Structures are given as C-alpha cells and as structure tokens.
Amino acid sequence: MATEYAESILLWQQTFLIGGCLKEKVKARSVPFSKTRNRHANETAEDYVEAVAEIIEESGECRVLDLARHFNVSHVTVSRIVKRLQDQQLLYSQPYRPVDLTPKGAKFAKRVRERHAVVLAFLMALGVDKSSAQIDSEGIEHHVGPKTLAAMKRFLEP
Amino acid sequence: MATEYAESILLWQQTFLIGGCLKEKVKARSVPFSKTRNRHANETAEDYVEAVAEIIEESGECRVLDLARHFNVSHVTVSRIVKRLQDQQLLYSQPYRPVDLTPKGAKFAKRVRERHAVVLAFLMALGVDKSSAQIDSEGIEHHVGPKTLAAMKRFLEP
DNA sequence: AACAAAATGTAGCATAAGCTACGGATAATG
DNA sequence: CATTATCCGTAGCTTATGCTACATTTTGTT
C-alpha cells in the first residue's frame, strides 16, 4: 500500500531526525531521501505535531481552526492533514472535537521541539536577530541531522 | 493567471534569498511564505538551477537524464519541471536537446551556489563531518535568509 | 542506409497541499 | 428553547511532484 510506504518513510525519518531515539525497527529503504514528495509530507508531519503540542500547552486544547490560523491555511487543508496524521497514529481526533497527540505523536513532538529549540538558540548565539532566527529556524530544523544537531549543541554549551 | 502568481512568488523569494541582489521589482504579496506548495516549488527551482549549472560546468552540457540521475527521479518528472522553469525563464530547452540556463537562470544559479557553498563550509567549520554536512546543507540552504547567511560568513571569516 | 540503442516526449494515474462553496454539528446567546 | 454564530466536514477544483507504459526522436553501429 502507498500508505504503508509513507509510514515506512516517516519512521525512517523519525529515526534519522532524532538520532535514533525511537526504538521502532524500520527496514531502511535505500532511496527515501531523494523522494521530495515524501520528504515534504514528513516536514508537514513535524510541523503539525509540533504545533499541536505548542497550542495545547498554551491554551489547553487544539482545534482545527487553531492550526489553520497557525499555518495560515484553510481549515480544509488542516482537516485533511490531520486525517493523514491520524492514520499514521501521530494524532488523535474525532469529528468536531479538538485534536490531540497520541503517545507516539507526543514522543515525536518532544524531539521535534527540542531540535527546534536548539536550532533557534544556535542561530541567535551566532548573532542572528531573533526575528530572522525564528523564521529561518522553522525551515532549517527539518534538515538538521544528528551530527549537525550535536555540533550546534557543542557550540551552545562549550 | 496562476503562472503569474507563481512568478511573483519566485521573484519575491529570489529577492529574499539572495539579500536583494536582483534588481527586479516585485510587489510583495502579503502571505506568500505560509503557502507551502509555492515554497516547495521554489526550492525545486533552486535545486534544478543549481544542478544544471554544476552539470554544465562538469561535463559541458546538461541532459534531462543527467538531472534525472542527479535527483534520482524519472526523466518524466524532470521533463515537466524543466518545462515550468522554462516558463519562468530560468532555463532554456528544446525538444531532445540539452538544457541550458537563461541569463536570469545563470544569475540565480550563481547566488544559490554561493549560498550553498557558504552553508556547507559553515557546517564543516562547525565540526560536522563532510558527508553529513553535504546532506544537511542541501536541505538547509533553502531556508538560510540574508541575516543568517551573513552570520555564517562572519563565522567563517573572523 | 538500416537497424538498434539511448534519450525524450506524452498519456494517464497517484498523493500532497492549497482553495471555494456548501451543509451539518456545536456552542453561545436572546 | 430557539436562534445565531462559530466550527468542522465533504465535494470538487488546482498545482506540484512522483510513477509506468508507450511513442517518438536522436545517436551510434554495422
């Protein structure tokens, strides 16, 4: 199934991104990274899981419209993506109900947020103004592998 | 036209990415950055223009199949993207002929390659091994704004 | 020149992410 | 409790990126 393949990529990515912290075994397909479409879908998963965690932390619950406003897209777009992330067992949602993280999603969100925080702090420590650092870190974070992340941490805590 | 809008976004991005080096005037639409689809299309433009420049430099000409092998996608995918970049006047191509950069594309490629080189050198200077730095820099480069780029340069040449 | 091989193009399908328009469900308010 | 406003789902369209299968053009060999 296509979904199964996407799932595989997702897990592969998770393992990559968070330095092998998740324990789930994944058969590494040889070429996932050259497939832009899947890579982008995965960045979306990271962004959404991160946003859900933040919004819940800030306001207690996360509605579809909160996400729509957060990403500046229509609620329809959010709806569809939430559905996919639910299939991937990262999010939990019921019709007309707030969105929540599954345990797997919460674990994923934790790592994504930590990595994001490191990248943001790193850029500011580099001398980038806060506003630029915030914008750039949101794009950069998805591409920071374990080695680069470790190097950023070393830079921050010498 | 949709094409016109995409063009506008492209130019907006160019201005952003290379720190306003291109002189072309662009009416800044208010929300382009939240529109993931256009942003991704633009990263693709950057990747392709960069690759075309490199391949021509290395082997004298750039065929569709060279790009297909470079990105590890089918020639069909390349074909369609080349067509779009030709519409955007970044590439020049004729049926069954090698692909070439337009003057606009060459200018764009120059900036993209310079930025990529800075990001790569920066990561290695940070202590990231070459292999990881190569992989990560290809993802990161698209999200490095002028301020971050300047900070990386300062780090490299104190 | 003819044939085979390689390169490219075209048709048609899938998935991801964007939208508007419309309808149904929930919540707030008189 | 009824009404209104807000929230959310569904239908259906678009563009971008992937694919396979097949057609066509160019190139290389005999």
Image (cartoon, coloured by chain):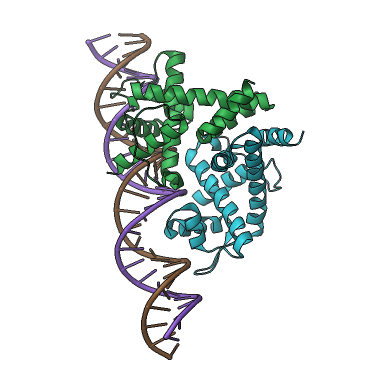
Chain colours: A green, B cyan, C brown, D purple
For this view, does A158 lie left or right of residue A32?
Answer: right
Residue A2 vertical placement versus B80 (above, below): above
Q: Residue at x 62, y 65 (%)?
A: B60
Residue A18 vertical placement versus D16 (above, below): above
- Between A127 and B1, the one lying in front of the other is A127
Question: Could you say where residue B32 lies in the image, as x and y percent from the top left?
Answer: 55, 38
Q: Residue at x 67, y 53 (%)?
A: B107
Q: Quadrant of residue A43?
A: top left
- Residue A16 appears in the picture as rendered: yes
Q: Residue at x 50, y 38 (%)?
A: B35
Query: What is the residue that sits farthest to the right in this orientation?
Result: B158
Question: Could you say where residue B82 lies in the image, as x and y percent from the top left?
Answer: 51, 58
For this view, does A93 lie left or right of residue B150?
Answer: left
Instruction: Tally the numbered discs.
Output: 0
Q: Residue at x 56, y 24 (%)?
A: A118
Question: Could you say where residue C19 lies in the image, as x and y percent from the top left?
Answer: 43, 38
Question: Could you say where residue A94 lies in the image, as x and y percent from the top left?
Answer: 28, 23
Q: Quadrant of residue A79?
A: top left
- Between D24 and C21, the one lying in front of the other is D24
Task: Tell me the quadrant of the picture where the C terminus of chain B can be found.
Answer: top right
- Residue A102 appears in the picture as rendered: no
For this view, does A67 lie left or right of residue A141?
Answer: left
